[in-house]
Image: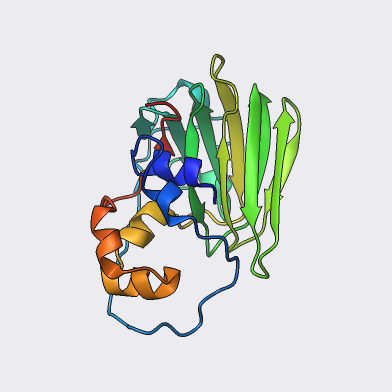
Amino acid sequence: MSARVLDRIFGIKPPGFFDQLNYKSSHDVIVGAKPADFSSSGRIKLPNTDTNLYKYNLGSIIPQIQTSGGTAALGTATFFPILSGLALFLIRLKPSGIVEPHTHPNAAELNYVVNGKVRFTVFGPSGEVESSEIGKGQVFFVASGYFHYLENPDNVTGSDVASFFNNESPEFIGLAGGLSAYSNEVLGSMFNKDPKFFSNLPRLDKDVFIASGTG
């Protein structure tokens, strides 16, 4: 993940915290020098708002997620029963908006660009990284458990993306909340830095989901 994206997710104006980290290794640290206990969890629950079994105007509802970087309207079987075993999110990114780097451990994801442009980056378990920019009518796929993020590369025009999942309750584990859950000692051992360095890392108690790509 680039320092630019990570700084924006944590609300840090560049040059910021992650520019200083300058961590280049793509290898997992299997055993660190200083272990610690941690835990975090979260789930979004949605109300039943429609009785029509085969049609639902996802674009007309008030998005359940609204941030400075964009919105997300969440379609699940909770209020659209025909989606049993599936889910659909309509994500609208403002200019330069960024979806937080995250993973879905229980669902694969297929994204369709409805309008505008999207730049996506996927990080695989063997250290492989794929990043590309696509436009209206194009799709990209993310396997279950792969870390990824997407952003609107246009700083003038917004973009819309339909995200399909093969699980009616896709779990979302964001990188911001994940890093915030670890102690300075654990992060120091993982990144080979003095633990005091991570005292400057903002600690977030919930997912960012969509961040603004501007200051």
Q: Is residue 205 visible?
A: no
Please state which of residues 113 and 44 is positioned toward the viewer in this rendering.
113
The image quadrant that residue 136 belongs to is top right
Q: Is residue 24 visible?
A: yes
Colour mapping: rainbow
Tell me the residue at 73%/32% (across/down). 134
- Residue 178 x %, y %: 37, 61
The image quadrant that residue 162 belongs to is top right
Q: How many marks?
A: 0
Residue 52 in the figure: left or right of residue 135: left
Residue 76 in the figure: left or right of residue 9: right
- Residue 25 x %, y %: 58, 66
Please state which of residues 41 and 28 is positioned toward the viewer in this rendering.
28
Please state which of residues 142 and 87 is positioned toward the viewer in this rendering.
142
- Residue 39 x %, y %: 29, 71
The image quadrant that residue 164 belongs to is top right
**Residue 183 versus residue 112 in the image, above or below:** below
Q: Residue furthest right?
A: 138
- Residue 180 x %, y %: 30, 59
Tell me the residue at 68%/35% (across/down). 112
Tell me the residue at 56%/15% (across/down). 157
Q: The C terminus lies in which quarter of the figure? A: top left
Residue 42 in the figure: left or right of residue 152: left
**Residue 167 versus residue 135 in the image, above or below:** below
